[in-house]
Amino acid sequence: MQLSIDLTGRDVLVTGTDTAARQAVRRYEAAGAVVYRLSTPHGAGHDGPLPEKPFLVAAVDDGQPGWGALLDRCRDAGIPVAAEPAAGQAGHVTLVGGGPGTTDLLTVAAVKALRDADVVFYDRLAPCQDLPLLTSAELVDVGKRPGHHKVGQSDIEKLMVESALAGNNVVRLKGGDPYVFGRGGEEVAACVAAGLKVQVVSGVTSAISVPAAAGIPVTHREVSHMFTVVSGHAPLTEKEHQHLAGLGGTIVVLMGIGTLHQLAAGLRRAGMRPDMPMAVVERGYRPGQRTTIADLGTITSAAAGCSNPAVLVIGEVVRVAEANQGHAGAAADLDRLAASLLGS
């Protein structure tokens, strides 16, 4: 959460119990303020002397009665009072789906969980670039990339559990949705085994949102009435290729660049026609987003320069996107022609 005024060197009095006010204290200190604490309405709980007239009073809603009179006296004295939410429950873990990587697609629940966090363990595919604007929590990068795990999965679970047992409100921020190839089930199990309270905030999965960013609907009337989501981390078996080829509809493959060759060849062997349209959408919602379209028979060579993170889409819905983009392009051409005629 970002404070919009310059508080550098200013005296700020934060009211509220230590537990409820811990995040407000950290946020104001990070903004450069000189923070004073008052933890009871009657002044009994404070650390050292209090400022005679603070620049601002940050009133944390801790549920205690009796704060109203004190805050009214501050207002009467011309001291601004800012209402602050109480910090979230301590010793708690929340798995948060961060969506495909853009802050715009964070859910309201995700933003609230980040605001209430003491520690955030985040992945590289989560919208981590804006985290300092969303939370005052300690930020820990545990991101993994293909072939190199910055922190192993068991170590991530250990860090989460240890931090929550130490009394922190922990957020595990993941790309997409925690339960769609996100190993969220394993992390929940680790928390439950440690006796911790844990909740899951669903995220916008890249299986749907990244194709949408490229204009590809995963279902479309009279084209596809189903879609199947597949992990591309490991090659599929021949039986899995046969099942996929026989299902029909749309196939969406997450993180499938490394196994693209095996996938395309396996689907062709399973009877899928070579001219089935296919798209590779790289870096969805991120700078450098790119879509490569070919067919099942030529996609391996067409996508030779593609890299993860990427989502593969196989099915006739890819043609729907091409058609829509063609109409959009034609409309844009007409707009440019009209503008040039009016200009002349």
Image (cartoon, rainbow, N blue to C red):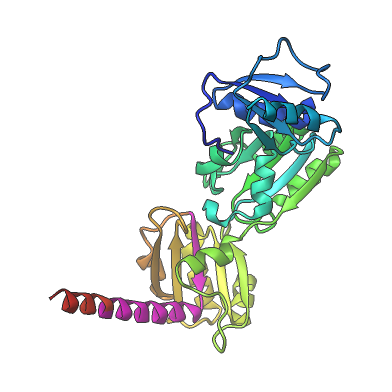
Q: Is residue 302 above or below residue 272?
A: above
The answer to which quarter of the image holds residue 251 is bottom right
Q: Is residue 174 above or below residue 344?
A: above
Magenta residues, start to end: 309-334
The answer to which quarter of the image holds residue 128 is top right
Q: Residue furthest front?
A: 76
- Residues 201 and 25: in front is 25
Q: Residue furthest top?
A: 48
Residue at the image position 73 percent from the left and 10 percent from the top: 48
Judged left or right of residue 18, residue 260 is left
Whether residue 178 is visible: yes
Residue 64 colored magenta? no
Q: Main secondary structure of the magenta part?
A: helix
The answer to which quarter of the image holds residue 131 is top right
User: Whole-percent x and y of residue 158?
Assistant: 73, 34
Q: Residue furthest left?
A: 344
User: Whole-percent x and y of residue 70?
Assistant: 77, 27
Residue at the image position 26 percent from the left and 78 percent from the top: 333
User: Whole-percent x and y of residue 44?
Assistant: 83, 16
Assign the C terminus to one quadrant of the image: bottom left
Residue at the image position 61 percent from the left and 67 percent from the top: 229
Numbered marks: total: 0
Q: Is residue 174 above or below residue 204?
A: above
Assign the N terminus to one quadrant of the image: top right
Residue 312 colored magenta? yes
User: Whole-percent x and y of residue 142?
Assistant: 60, 38
Whether residue 148 is visible: no
- Residues 109 and 47: in front is 47
Q: Is residue 179 above or below residue 338?
A: above
